[in-house]
Amino acid sequence: MKASEILKPLGVFVAVIAVVVAGTALVGTLAGSGSAGPADGEEIEGQSPGQFAPENVLATSAPEDGEISIDGSGERKRILVDSGHSNRYSRSDLAPLVEALAQAGHEVDFTPDTPGDAGGFGQTSYNATLRQYDAVLILQPTASFSDGEIAGLTAYADGGGRIAVLAEPPQLSVGSGLSAQVTQVRFGAQDLVGEFGLRMGTEGLYNIEDGGNDNNYESIVASPDGSSPLTEGVSNVTFDSAGYVVRTSDDAEVRMRAISGTRTLERRQAGQYPVAAQNDNLVLVADTSFLKSSELYDLDNERFAGNLVEFLVSGDKDEGVPQGSGGTDDGGFGDDGGDDGGGENGGGGGGGTTPITPSP
Protein backbone atom coordinates (compact mmCIF):
# COMPACT_ATOMS: atom_id res chain seq x y z
CA MET A 1 0.00 0.00 0.00
CA LYS A 2 1.28 3.44 -0.86
CA ALA A 3 2.10 5.93 1.86
CA SER A 4 -0.38 8.45 0.40
CA GLU A 5 -3.24 5.95 0.79
CA ILE A 6 -2.51 5.67 4.52
CA LEU A 7 -1.90 9.35 5.25
CA LYS A 8 -5.04 10.64 3.52
CA PRO A 9 -7.63 8.99 5.90
CA LEU A 10 -5.39 9.79 8.85
CA GLY A 11 -5.39 13.44 7.88
CA VAL A 12 -9.20 13.50 7.73
CA PHE A 13 -9.42 11.94 11.21
CA VAL A 14 -7.02 14.51 12.67
CA ALA A 15 -9.04 17.33 11.12
CA VAL A 16 -12.28 16.06 12.68
CA ILE A 17 -10.65 15.85 16.11
CA ALA A 18 -9.38 19.41 15.75
CA VAL A 19 -12.86 20.70 14.91
CA VAL A 20 -14.35 18.97 17.95
CA VAL A 21 -11.70 20.35 20.30
CA ALA A 22 -12.13 23.84 18.90
CA GLY A 23 -15.89 23.67 19.34
CA THR A 24 -15.57 22.57 22.95
CA ALA A 25 -13.20 25.42 23.71
CA LEU A 26 -15.61 27.92 22.12
CA VAL A 27 -18.51 26.71 24.28
CA GLY A 28 -16.37 26.99 27.38
CA THR A 29 -15.41 30.55 26.47
CA LEU A 30 -19.02 31.59 25.97
CA ALA A 31 -20.06 30.02 29.27
CA GLY A 32 -17.31 31.85 31.07
CA SER A 33 -18.44 35.19 29.61
CA GLY A 34 -21.70 35.09 31.64
CA SER A 35 -24.14 33.85 29.02
CA ALA A 36 -25.08 30.69 30.98
CA GLY A 37 -27.96 28.53 29.78
CA PRO A 38 -31.27 28.31 31.65
CA ALA A 39 -31.38 26.62 35.05
CA ASP A 40 -32.97 23.21 35.30
CA GLY A 41 -36.74 23.46 34.94
CA GLU A 42 -36.77 27.06 33.67
CA GLU A 43 -37.47 28.37 30.18
CA ILE A 44 -36.70 25.14 28.41
CA GLU A 45 -38.58 24.75 25.18
CA GLY A 46 -41.12 21.98 25.25
CA GLN A 47 -41.78 21.77 29.01
CA SER A 48 -43.77 23.71 31.61
CA PRO A 49 -41.56 25.67 34.07
CA GLY A 50 -44.29 25.72 36.73
CA GLN A 51 -44.70 21.96 36.71
CA PHE A 52 -41.06 20.92 36.54
CA ALA A 53 -39.34 23.60 38.61
CA PRO A 54 -37.41 21.91 41.46
CA GLU A 55 -39.42 23.59 44.20
CA ASN A 56 -42.60 22.08 42.75
CA VAL A 57 -41.20 18.63 41.98
CA LEU A 58 -39.88 17.96 45.49
CA ALA A 59 -42.54 16.54 47.82
CA THR A 60 -43.23 18.41 51.04
CA SER A 61 -44.38 16.94 54.32
CA ALA A 62 -46.22 18.42 57.26
CA PRO A 63 -44.02 20.33 59.74
CA GLU A 64 -42.89 18.20 62.67
CA ASP A 65 -42.54 19.97 65.99
CA GLY A 66 -44.25 20.37 69.36
CA GLU A 67 -44.53 18.22 72.47
CA ILE A 68 -47.12 16.25 74.39
CA SER A 69 -48.45 18.41 77.20
CA ILE A 70 -50.09 16.74 80.21
CA ASP A 71 -51.24 18.55 83.33
CA GLY A 72 -49.26 17.13 86.22
CA SER A 73 -51.03 19.06 88.98
CA GLY A 74 -53.87 16.59 89.45
CA GLU A 75 -54.18 13.27 91.22
CA ARG A 76 -51.73 10.52 90.31
CA LYS A 77 -53.47 7.99 88.04
CA ARG A 78 -52.72 4.46 86.86
CA ILE A 79 -53.21 3.61 83.19
CA LEU A 80 -53.37 0.07 81.85
CA VAL A 81 -52.36 -0.63 78.24
CA ASP A 82 -54.03 -3.75 76.83
CA SER A 83 -51.60 -6.24 75.28
CA GLY A 84 -53.61 -9.43 75.69
CA HIS A 85 -55.83 -9.40 72.60
CA SER A 86 -53.28 -9.91 69.82
CA ASN A 87 -52.83 -6.15 69.71
CA ARG A 88 -50.92 -4.91 66.66
CA TYR A 89 -48.63 -2.23 68.03
CA SER A 90 -45.07 -1.89 69.25
CA ARG A 91 -44.34 -0.68 72.77
CA SER A 92 -41.58 1.49 71.33
CA ASP A 93 -44.28 3.39 69.42
CA LEU A 94 -45.75 4.46 72.75
CA ALA A 95 -42.46 5.62 74.27
CA PRO A 96 -43.19 9.38 73.94
CA LEU A 97 -46.65 8.90 75.46
CA VAL A 98 -45.37 6.81 78.37
CA GLU A 99 -42.57 9.33 78.96
CA ALA A 100 -45.01 12.25 79.11
CA LEU A 101 -47.30 10.40 81.52
CA ALA A 102 -44.39 9.48 83.80
CA GLN A 103 -43.14 13.06 83.86
CA ALA A 104 -46.63 14.19 84.87
CA GLY A 105 -46.56 11.72 87.77
CA HIS A 106 -48.76 8.98 86.36
CA GLU A 107 -48.06 5.25 86.07
CA VAL A 108 -48.37 3.10 82.94
CA ASP A 109 -48.52 -0.72 82.97
CA PHE A 110 -48.91 -3.24 80.15
CA THR A 111 -50.90 -6.45 80.44
CA PRO A 112 -48.84 -9.49 79.44
CA ASP A 113 -48.96 -10.69 75.85
CA THR A 114 -50.14 -14.15 76.90
CA PRO A 115 -52.33 -15.32 79.78
CA GLY A 116 -50.81 -16.60 82.98
CA ASP A 117 -47.62 -14.52 82.86
CA ALA A 118 -46.25 -13.49 86.23
CA GLY A 119 -46.66 -9.81 86.84
CA GLY A 120 -47.46 -7.22 89.45
CA PHE A 121 -50.72 -8.98 90.41
CA GLY A 122 -49.85 -12.62 89.88
CA GLN A 123 -52.33 -14.78 87.98
CA THR A 124 -55.50 -12.72 88.10
CA SER A 125 -58.27 -12.26 85.56
CA TYR A 126 -58.45 -9.38 83.12
CA ASN A 127 -61.46 -7.94 84.91
CA ALA A 128 -59.91 -8.23 88.35
CA THR A 129 -56.88 -6.35 87.05
CA LEU A 130 -59.09 -3.54 85.74
CA ARG A 131 -60.21 -2.68 89.25
CA GLN A 132 -56.79 -1.37 90.13
CA TYR A 133 -56.57 1.13 87.29
CA ASP A 134 -58.16 4.49 86.53
CA ALA A 135 -58.04 4.18 82.74
CA VAL A 136 -57.47 1.63 79.98
CA LEU A 137 -55.84 2.17 76.58
CA ILE A 138 -56.69 -0.48 73.97
CA LEU A 139 -54.75 -0.32 70.70
CA GLN A 140 -55.76 -2.29 67.60
CA PRO A 141 -56.88 -5.56 69.18
CA THR A 142 -57.29 -8.31 66.59
CA ALA A 143 -58.58 -11.00 68.97
CA SER A 144 -62.11 -10.81 70.33
CA PHE A 145 -63.04 -9.77 73.84
CA SER A 146 -65.03 -12.36 75.76
CA ASP A 147 -68.55 -11.63 76.96
CA GLY A 148 -67.22 -11.39 80.51
CA GLU A 149 -64.57 -8.88 79.52
CA ILE A 150 -67.09 -6.74 77.65
CA ALA A 151 -69.41 -6.78 80.67
CA GLY A 152 -66.48 -5.86 82.88
CA LEU A 153 -65.33 -2.95 80.72
CA THR A 154 -68.89 -1.64 80.40
CA ALA A 155 -69.30 -1.68 84.18
CA TYR A 156 -65.85 -0.13 84.48
CA ALA A 157 -66.90 2.85 82.33
CA ASP A 158 -70.21 3.16 84.19
CA GLY A 159 -68.18 3.44 87.40
CA GLY A 160 -66.10 6.35 86.10
CA GLY A 161 -63.19 4.47 84.51
CA ARG A 162 -61.94 5.91 81.24
CA ILE A 163 -61.42 3.78 78.10
CA ALA A 164 -59.68 4.83 74.88
CA VAL A 165 -59.86 2.40 71.95
CA LEU A 166 -57.65 2.96 68.91
CA ALA A 167 -58.48 0.91 65.84
CA GLU A 168 -57.56 0.36 62.20
CA PRO A 169 -59.62 -0.84 59.24
CA PRO A 170 -59.37 -4.47 58.02
CA GLN A 171 -55.96 -5.32 56.55
CA LEU A 172 -54.44 -8.23 54.64
CA SER A 173 -51.71 -10.21 56.37
CA VAL A 174 -49.37 -12.55 54.48
CA GLY A 175 -47.92 -15.51 56.33
CA SER A 176 -44.35 -16.77 55.99
CA GLY A 177 -42.98 -19.81 54.20
CA LEU A 178 -43.56 -21.36 50.78
CA SER A 179 -47.22 -22.06 51.54
CA ALA A 180 -47.89 -18.61 52.97
CA GLN A 181 -51.58 -17.79 53.23
CA VAL A 182 -53.19 -14.38 52.92
CA THR A 183 -55.64 -13.63 55.72
CA GLN A 184 -57.66 -10.58 56.65
CA VAL A 185 -56.91 -9.01 60.01
CA ARG A 186 -59.96 -7.42 61.58
CA PHE A 187 -60.64 -5.13 64.52
CA GLY A 188 -61.35 -7.33 67.53
CA ALA A 189 -63.26 -4.93 69.77
CA GLN A 190 -66.32 -4.42 67.55
CA ASP A 191 -68.65 -5.95 70.15
CA LEU A 192 -67.04 -3.89 72.92
CA VAL A 193 -67.46 -0.48 71.25
CA GLY A 194 -70.92 -1.62 70.11
CA GLU A 195 -71.98 -1.45 73.77
CA PHE A 196 -71.27 2.29 73.55
CA GLY A 197 -73.20 2.95 70.34
CA LEU A 198 -70.18 2.85 68.03
CA ARG A 199 -68.54 0.53 65.53
CA MET A 200 -65.63 0.56 63.10
CA GLY A 201 -66.31 0.92 59.40
CA THR A 202 -65.26 -1.83 57.01
CA GLU A 203 -62.92 0.20 54.79
CA GLY A 204 -59.91 2.45 54.97
CA LEU A 205 -59.84 6.05 53.72
CA TYR A 206 -57.76 8.00 51.23
CA ASN A 207 -57.54 11.52 49.78
CA ILE A 208 -55.71 12.55 46.59
CA GLU A 209 -56.67 16.23 46.60
CA ASP A 210 -54.12 18.98 47.23
CA GLY A 211 -53.95 19.69 50.94
CA GLY A 212 -55.99 16.58 51.71
CA ASN A 213 -53.09 14.32 52.62
CA ASP A 214 -49.58 14.35 54.04
CA ASN A 215 -47.41 13.28 51.10
CA ASN A 216 -49.31 9.99 50.79
CA TYR A 217 -52.83 9.50 49.52
CA GLU A 218 -53.61 7.17 52.45
CA SER A 219 -52.26 9.65 55.01
CA ILE A 220 -55.47 11.63 55.35
CA VAL A 221 -56.09 14.91 57.17
CA ALA A 222 -58.87 15.25 59.76
CA SER A 223 -60.22 18.23 61.69
CA PRO A 224 -62.47 18.73 64.75
CA ASP A 225 -66.24 18.47 64.52
CA GLY A 226 -67.32 21.12 66.99
CA SER A 227 -65.49 21.96 70.19
CA SER A 228 -64.68 19.55 72.99
CA PRO A 229 -61.83 18.91 75.44
CA LEU A 230 -60.67 16.13 73.13
CA THR A 231 -60.04 18.59 70.27
CA GLU A 232 -59.01 21.69 72.20
CA GLY A 233 -56.20 23.50 70.39
CA VAL A 234 -56.40 21.11 67.42
CA SER A 235 -56.82 22.38 63.85
CA ASN A 236 -55.72 19.41 61.74
CA VAL A 237 -54.20 15.98 62.37
CA THR A 238 -52.83 13.34 60.02
CA PHE A 239 -53.87 9.69 60.16
CA ASP A 240 -51.71 7.26 58.16
CA SER A 241 -53.94 4.20 58.48
CA ALA A 242 -57.38 5.66 59.07
CA GLY A 243 -60.71 3.96 58.94
CA TYR A 244 -63.99 5.57 59.92
CA VAL A 245 -66.39 5.40 62.84
CA VAL A 246 -70.11 4.64 62.57
CA ARG A 247 -72.53 5.84 65.24
CA THR A 248 -75.29 3.42 66.19
CA SER A 249 -76.62 5.50 69.08
CA ASP A 250 -77.46 9.18 69.50
CA ASP A 251 -75.56 9.11 72.79
CA ALA A 252 -72.29 8.88 70.89
CA GLU A 253 -70.85 12.16 69.58
CA VAL A 254 -68.47 12.69 66.68
CA ARG A 255 -65.29 14.53 67.69
CA MET A 256 -63.26 14.55 64.45
CA ARG A 257 -63.97 14.09 60.75
CA ALA A 258 -61.85 13.53 57.66
CA ILE A 259 -61.73 16.70 55.58
CA SER A 260 -63.59 17.18 52.32
CA GLY A 261 -62.41 15.04 49.40
CA THR A 262 -61.76 11.92 51.47
CA ARG A 263 -63.03 8.66 49.99
CA THR A 264 -63.34 5.02 51.00
CA LEU A 265 -60.67 2.75 49.51
CA GLU A 266 -62.98 0.13 47.99
CA ARG A 267 -66.24 1.86 47.13
CA ARG A 268 -64.60 5.23 46.31
CA GLN A 269 -67.41 7.06 48.06
CA ALA A 270 -66.58 10.62 49.09
CA GLY A 271 -67.61 12.11 52.42
CA GLN A 272 -66.43 13.78 55.60
CA TYR A 273 -66.21 10.54 57.52
CA PRO A 274 -66.11 10.50 61.34
CA VAL A 275 -62.69 9.31 62.54
CA ALA A 276 -63.06 9.90 66.29
CA ALA A 277 -66.14 9.69 68.50
CA GLN A 278 -66.98 9.64 72.19
CA ASN A 279 -69.71 8.20 74.36
CA ASP A 280 -69.27 9.42 77.92
CA ASN A 281 -66.22 7.56 79.30
CA LEU A 282 -65.21 5.79 76.08
CA VAL A 283 -63.41 7.29 73.09
CA LEU A 284 -62.95 5.46 69.78
CA VAL A 285 -60.33 6.69 67.28
CA ALA A 286 -60.18 4.99 63.89
CA ASP A 287 -56.38 5.14 63.64
CA THR A 288 -53.32 4.17 65.67
CA SER A 289 -50.52 5.69 63.60
CA PHE A 290 -50.69 9.21 65.07
CA LEU A 291 -49.09 7.93 68.31
CA LYS A 292 -45.96 6.63 66.58
CA SER A 293 -42.77 8.63 67.06
CA SER A 294 -42.52 9.15 63.30
CA GLU A 295 -46.01 10.70 63.11
CA LEU A 296 -46.59 12.17 66.55
CA TYR A 297 -45.36 15.66 65.69
CA ASP A 298 -47.08 16.09 62.31
CA LEU A 299 -49.51 19.03 62.22
CA ASP A 300 -51.44 18.97 65.55
CA ASN A 301 -51.03 15.24 66.24
CA GLU A 302 -49.18 15.83 69.50
CA ARG A 303 -51.94 18.15 70.69
CA PHE A 304 -54.61 15.58 69.92
CA ALA A 305 -52.55 12.84 71.60
CA GLY A 306 -52.12 15.06 74.66
CA ASN A 307 -55.86 15.68 74.83
CA LEU A 308 -56.52 11.95 74.57
CA VAL A 309 -54.17 11.30 77.49
CA GLU A 310 -55.81 14.10 79.49
CA PHE A 311 -59.12 12.34 78.89
CA LEU A 312 -57.67 9.14 80.35
CA VAL A 313 -56.21 10.73 83.49
CA SER A 314 -59.02 13.17 84.22
CA GLY A 315 -61.70 10.60 85.03
CA ASP A 316 -63.21 10.15 88.48
CA LYS A 317 -63.42 6.42 88.99
CA ASP A 318 -65.43 5.34 92.04
CA GLU A 319 -63.42 4.53 95.14
CA GLY A 320 -65.30 1.25 95.48
CA VAL A 321 -65.63 -1.12 92.58
CA PRO A 322 -69.04 -0.55 90.89
CA GLN A 323 -71.52 -3.20 91.97
CA GLY A 324 -72.99 -5.51 89.38
CA SER A 325 -76.55 -6.72 89.06
CA GLY A 326 -78.00 -10.05 90.05
CA GLY A 327 -76.80 -10.00 93.64
CA THR A 328 -73.27 -11.17 92.81
CA ASP A 329 -70.23 -9.75 94.49
CA ASP A 330 -68.04 -9.63 91.40
CA GLY A 331 -68.22 -5.85 91.21
CA GLY A 332 -70.05 -5.89 87.90
CA PHE A 333 -66.97 -7.22 86.14
CA GLY A 334 -68.42 -10.45 84.87
CA ASP A 335 -67.12 -13.84 85.90
CA ASP A 336 -64.07 -13.19 88.02
CA GLY A 337 -63.14 -16.84 88.26
CA GLY A 338 -60.47 -17.12 85.61
CA ASP A 339 -62.15 -15.31 82.69
CA ASP A 340 -58.92 -14.20 81.14
CA GLY A 341 -60.21 -13.60 77.64
CA GLY A 342 -58.45 -16.67 76.27
CA GLY A 343 -60.00 -19.85 74.93
CA GLU A 344 -61.90 -19.76 71.68
CA ASN A 345 -61.83 -15.98 71.55
CA GLY A 346 -58.03 -15.96 71.57
CA GLY A 347 -58.03 -12.96 73.89
CA GLY A 348 -55.09 -13.87 76.08
CA GLY A 349 -56.17 -11.70 79.00
CA GLY A 350 -54.16 -10.22 81.76
CA GLY A 351 -52.51 -12.57 84.17
CA GLY A 352 -50.81 -9.67 85.88
CA THR A 353 -49.12 -6.64 84.41
CA THR A 354 -45.73 -5.50 83.25
CA PRO A 355 -44.87 -2.12 84.80
CA ILE A 356 -43.04 0.37 82.64
CA THR A 357 -40.86 2.98 84.30
CA PRO A 358 -39.29 5.26 81.67
CA SER A 359 -36.42 7.56 82.46
CA PRO A 360 -37.58 10.96 83.77
Image (cartoon, grey):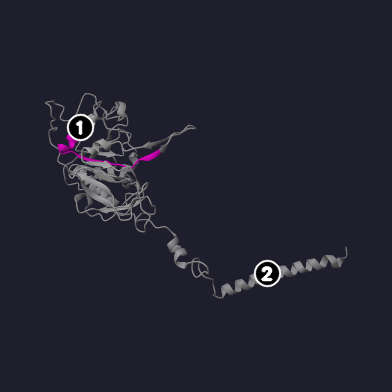
Tell me the quarter of the image containing the C terminus: top left
Residue at 20% across / 32% down in the picture?
151
> For residue 176, which numbered disc appears in the image?
none
Disc 1 packing (10 Å; few <14; some 14–19; many ≥20): many
Indicate the secondary structure of the residue bearing disc 2: helix
Above or below residue 108? Residue 225 is below
Amino acid at pointer 2: Val
Q: Are marks 1 and 2 in contact (CB under 8 Å)?
A: no
Q: Residue at x 47, y 67 (%)?
A: 49
Lateral position of residue 55 relative to residue 135, left or right: right
The location of residue 209, given as percent across then percent down, is 36, 57
In depth, the one of 258 and 317 nearer the eye is 258
Q: Assign the N terminus to one quadrant of the image.
A: bottom right
Q: Is residue 166 magenta?
A: yes
- Dot 1 lies on which element? helix
Residue 69 is at least partly visible in this image = no
- Closest to the camera, between mark 1 and mark 2, is 1
Give coordinates of residue 9: x percent, y percent.
Answer: 79, 66
Q: Nearer the viewer, residue 264 or 295?
A: 264
Which residue is identified by label 1?
A: 152
Closer to the chain start, of discs 1 and 2, is 2
Residue that numbered label 2 is attached to: 21
Query: Does residue 241 sit above or below 39 in this rendering?
Result: above
Direction from residue 53 to residue 225 in the image, left or right: left
Answer few, some or many: residues within 10 Å of disc 2's Cα (few below 14, many 20 plus, some between 14 and 19): few
Residue 219 spot, x, y in % from top left: 36, 51
Magenta segment boundaries in residue numbering: 154-172
| Figure quadrant of residue 145 | top left
